[in-house]
Image: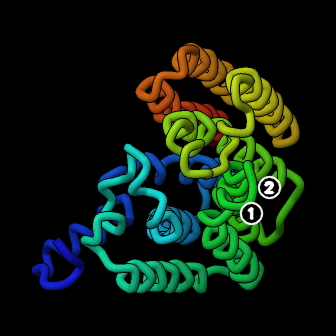
Amino acid sequence: MTATGADPVNRLLLYARLARLDRPIGNFLLLWPTLWALWLAADGLPRPGVFSVFVLGVFVMRAAGCVINDYADRDFDRHVERTRNRPLTTGQVSEREALALFVVLCLIAFGLVLLMNRLTILLSLVGVALAATYPFMKRHTHLPQVHLGAAFGWAAPMAFAAQAGEVTSLAWLIFAAAVIWATIYDTEYAMVDRNDDLKIGIKSTAVLFGRHDRLMIGVLMVLMTLLLVVIGGQAGLGVAWYAGVAVASLLFVHQQRLIRERRREDCFRAFLNNNIYGGIVFAGLVVDTLPVF
């Protein structure tokens, strides 16, 4: 099947697959730190307009990131077991279509951010640059997971700018936490493809860490937990926040058990488990910031 001659409904379904709408896990991994930042910037429930823009922005920018990632990796994906059937790799969607879809999604995201204040708009330009350059990092550095964390975590300073009108030190702590967390879960994800990546020369933290991968992920997990404790202290949070962090840390222990044998399916399960991790941290934050009547 080629990129031409297909009926409109089928084309839309292919575009949806290209944007990974059928795999929402990435939406949640981007959404959780965004919600952490919004709630802390607002000392509780954020303004409805800001909340709506950021939630919609998460879904749109994640879709855009998936499209440009597949465009960048179109010549590599056919050599990787997990990605060889993606629409762009198989020729079901053309390169021109993929770029056009990326531009449209970025324009929608920019239209959303134009509803916010000037500082948020300026910060969004950095966010777009981070998202657009991430897919190409794996050719030049073993740290694309860190770059992904920066792209995902950039929602934190933007959320503070939109909700509070300023970017405080607390925003940068959340940004740092998002970078560390993304490095954890995306390294677990990269462990799934490590053998294929080594054959075709793709770089990742999983390749960089090698046989020390579990140790390095464990160190990052400890740093992540300590950073969440520091965030709680600086924000003046209480028992519910720390309880959420404690429960979430048990999931890190579970993930270490999953990746112990470095089997593909178990490493992928560890990656997916981070959605629950982010949700538990957020639940603790929501409970802690509930108004007391």
Q: Residue furthest left?
A: 7
Residue drawn where x is 22% and y is 74% of the image:
12
Give the x, y percent position of residue 45.
Answer: 60, 53
Q: Earlier in the sequence, mark 1 or mark 2?
A: 1
Q: Amino acid at mark 2?
A: Ala
Q: Of residues 67 and 127, which is closer to you in this image?
A: 67
Give the image quarter of residue 259.
top right
Q: Of residues 171 and 217, which is closer to you in this image?
A: 217
Q: Of residues 96 and 155, which is closer to you in this image?
A: 96
Give the x, y percent position of residue 123.
Answer: 74, 75
Residue drawn where x is 29% and y is 64% of the image:
90
Q: Circles 1 and 2: CB distance less than 8 Å?
A: yes
- Is residue 82 visible in the rendered image? The answer is yes
Labels in figure, total: 2
- The quarter of the picture where the N terminus appears is bottom left
- Vertical relation: 94 (above or below) 187: below
**Residue that badge 1 annotates:** 160
- Vertical relation: 117 (above or below) 286: below
Give the image quarter of residue 215.
top right
- Vertical relation: 136 (above or below) 251: below
Q: Amino acid at mark 1?
A: Phe
Q: Which mark is residue 171?
A: 2
Answer with left or right where residue 286 lies relative to residue 147: left
Residue drawn where x is 74% and y is 41% of the image:
180
Give the x, y percent position of residue 172.
Answer: 83, 54
Answer with left or right where residue 53 lies relative to residue 171: left
Residue drawn where x is 65% and y is 57% of the image:
138
